[in-house]
Image: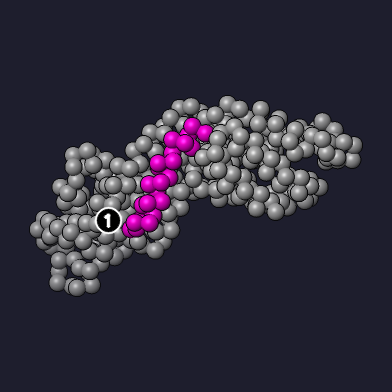
Amino acid sequence: MQDAITTLINSSDMQGRYLDDTSLENLQSYFRSGDLRARAAMSISANTSKIVTKTVAKALLYTDITGPGGNMYTCRRYAACIRDMEYFFRHATYALLSGDPSLSDERLLTALKETYNSLGVPVGATVRSVQAMKEVVNEMLGADAGREMGVCFDHICSGLG
Amino acid sequence: MSIITQAIANADREARYLSRGELNNISYFFQDGQQRLRIASILTNNVQLIVEKGSQRFWQRCSITPSNSGNATFQASCLRDQGWFLRLISYAVVVGDIDPIQASGVKGAKEMYNSLEIPLRNVAECMRCLKEVTLDLLSLEDAAEVAPYFDYLIQGLMP
C-alpha cells in the first residue's frame, strides 16, 4: 500500500535520486494539509450512516432501481447496496488520509467492475451514487475537505467507469 | 509503509474507520512533517561533503580495506554506496519509518558484501563514520531524529 510519501520515495529510489525540491514541496503541502485531512476523517467516521442515508435518498431512493425489477429490490439487495456504499466511503476516507487517491486501487477497485458486471449490478447507478456521495460530503465537510474527498470519489468513479 | 498506510492497513483488515488514537498519531506525524523534510533537505544538500568526510574518517580508522587499497573502482564503489545509504536514511527520515532502509538497504546486504569479499565489519564501521559526520552537521534536536536510523542500518550490516 502506498501513500503520498511512500509513492515519492519508491519512485525516487528506483531512479537512485534524492528527493528533489519539487518532491519536498509536494510533501510539504501534504503535511500542511494534514490537519484538515485528519479532522475530516474524524467527522466522517462519526457520521457514516447519516451520509449513506442522505446519499441513497439523493441518488437512488426515488428511482426505478428500488422498485420490483430494480437492482435494489428486495431488502437483501438493498442491504448489499448500502454495504458497498459504506465500503466506497471508507476507502475514500483512507485515500483522503494517505493523500493518494490510487490507494483505493489495490483493495477496492481491482476487478470491482468485473465483479459488478457478473453480479448484474448496474455500474451507471453505482457511479451516480458515488457522485451523490461526493455532494453530500461536500455539504458536510465544507469546501476544502470536500474538494479533497471529491478527488478520491472521482478516482473511484473512473475505476468503475 | 508510513504510519498512515500502516494504520489504514490495520483498519481495513477489520473493515473499520481509523480510531481516534490512530488519527491523533497521524496528526502528530503531520505536525512533525516540516522538521523531517527540513532534515532531509539538509542531508540532500550536503551529500558530497558528508560522503567525503565520512570516507576520510573511515580510511583513517580502517586503513586496510578494499576501498583504500589503491583500486580506483573499489574506491568509487565505496563512495557510491555511502551516497546510497545516506539516501535511504533521508527517505526514512521523511517517512518516519525504517522501511526504506530495510527494504532497499539491509535486506540481502550481508550476502552481497560477503560475496563481493568486502569485510562487513568495515562496512559497518564506514556507516558509523558516516553517522558521526552527519550528526556533526545537525542541531541536537535534528541529530536525535536521524541517529536511530543510522543505528538501525549499522545493526543490519553487522557481521
Instruction: Inspect this view and state whether residue B107 appears.
Output: no
**Residue B4 picture location, percent across and down:** 46, 40
- Looking at the image, residue B61 sits to the left or right of residue A55; the answer is left
Q: Nearer the viewer, residue B150 or A30?
A: A30
State the SS at label 1: helix
Measuring from the top left, give residue A132's x and y in whole percent. Answer: 69, 40
Which quadrant would the C terminus of chain A be assigned to in this image?
bottom right
Q: Tell me which corner region of the image, top left, top right, bottom left or bottom right, holds residue A65.
A: top right
Which quadrant of the structure image shows residue B1? top left
Judge whether residue A62 is colored magenta.
Answer: no
Q: Nearer the viewer, residue A13 or B156?
A: A13
Q: Give the left or right position of residue A55, taking residue B152 as reference.
A: right
Q: Mark 1 points at which residue?
A: B44
Q: Give the range drawn in magenta.
A: A18-40
Residue at x 37%, y 51% (from the top left corner): A25
Residue at 17% x, 49% y is B137
Residue at point 42% right, 48% down?
A: A5
Q: In this view, does A36 lie above or below B43?
A: above
Q: Which residue is drawn at 38% across and 33% down?
A: B28
Magenta: main secondary structure:
helix
* Image label count: 1
Amino acid type, callout 1: Thr
Q: In which quarter of the image is residue A59?
A: top right
Residue A113: x %, y % from top left: 71, 51
Q: Position of residue B156 (x, y in %)?
A: 30, 48
Query: Which residue is situated farthest in the right direction here?
Result: A68
A25 in magenta: yes
